[in-house]
Amino acid sequence: MEESDDERRTWDENQIRKYDIKMKSVPKHSFVDPIVMEIMLEGRPVIITDSKMVEPAAKWNLKYLARHMGNTNCNVIVSKDHNFKYYDDKCVQKAVRAKFVPPHKKVTMKIGEFVDKIKEMSPGGERLYLQQALTHSVGTEIVKDFLQFKWDYIKGIQKEMGWGSLTSNLLLIGMEGNVTPCHYDEQENLFAQVKGYKRILLFPPEQFECLYPHPVWHPHDRQSQVDFDDPDLTKFPKFANAMAQEAIVGPGDVLFIPNYWFHHVESLQNGGYTVSVNFWYKSKSTGAVAYPLNATQKMAIMRNVEKMLVDALRDPDEVGPLLRNLTLGRYH
Ligand SMILES: CCC[C@@H](CC(=O)O)C(=O)C(=O)O
Ligand SMILES: [Zn+2]
């Protein structure tokens, strides 16, 4: 994967993975256009162009990062295929953990080692995905660049949206073709694309029933059970009704991914490595609850019911039978 300064200025269709999913485009507007805030305030995704929000990161190519992040122990995921399906191996009950086979390895390595490894990667071989929180530990030059992000603009959005605190920024360096499979996060996300192109498929919380997330107690909590490369429509019939909103983002674009919106993210194939920086915020506190409840609130309620049942029943295997006894033939 050669370092080329004349990075691709655009992309073409054959770099995009083909899925049998109906889709429409995410709106794309300049940061100066008031419609951007209108769309965000409605809780809908939008691609924001020309903001220069993370302009200082435009120089974050592998050479620069290796030079200035050299001593940082970076979190890197190693996968045997193109999928990097997140799993949480910390708060997992022993019984569940015993049955769970992690789909990939999580390792730490210096960025120099990461750069060497991705350069020698062979097609079909192991893939790497560096996912490192940007904290003071990433080195003074990187911190300096970070502090020169357009924080007035960023904080303006945070304030107008009524978001809580900025919880973290992840630096994401992916190999071409890497996929983060469909999942949702419980935070608002300003997703800044720095280098290369990514395609994101987004689905609103209303489509929860089409995407079948794993149970909340499962290591793959929040991740869809549907394999987009080979969907099992017998097990997940409503996936056929899913309608995606597609965003293709390149250097300088920022995508708003609203809290609880499902998203699938891929680094375009044959597009070289990608660099992104995300900004995760605590969502607006719900305050007075207005009825009818929206889909996001209903997803939060379902999560709380599942958690309560797991705590009460202790055995996750008893949750399904109890919910079936509660609903089948009674709530239709
Ligand atoms: C670990 C976070 C990965 C990221 C998707 C991607 O860029 O591969 C994402 O899902 C998010 O920013 O919410
Ligand atoms: Zn995410």
Image: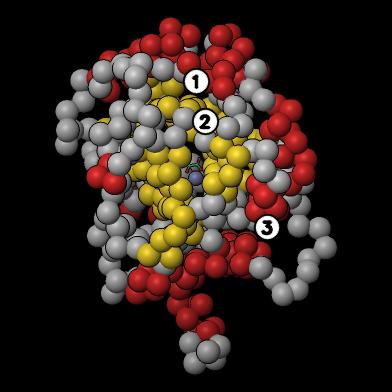
Q: Residue at x 62, y 12 (%)?
A: 144
Task: Classify residue 184 as left or right of residue 76.
Answer: right
Ligand 1 within 8 angstroms of badge 1 C-beta: no
Is 318 located above or below residue 331 in the figure?
A: above
Question: In front: mark 3 or mark 2?
Answer: 2
- Amino acid carrying mark 1 in the image: Ala
Q: Label for residue 252? A: 2
Task: Classify residue 37 as left or right of residue 121.
Answer: right
- Residue 141, percent from left and from top: 56, 9
Q: Residue at x 52, y 84 (%)?
A: 327
Q: In which quarter of the image is the N terminus?
A: top left
Circles 1 and 3: CB distance less than 8 Å? no
Secondary element type, mark 3: loop
For label 1, count other residues whose C-alpha is less than 10 Å away and answer few (under 14), some (14-19) or many (20+): some
Q: How is the image coloured?
A: secondary structure
- Residue 53, percent from left and from top: 61, 28
Circles 1 and 2: CB distance less than 8 Å? yes
Among numbered discs 3 and 2, the one appearing first in the sequence: 3
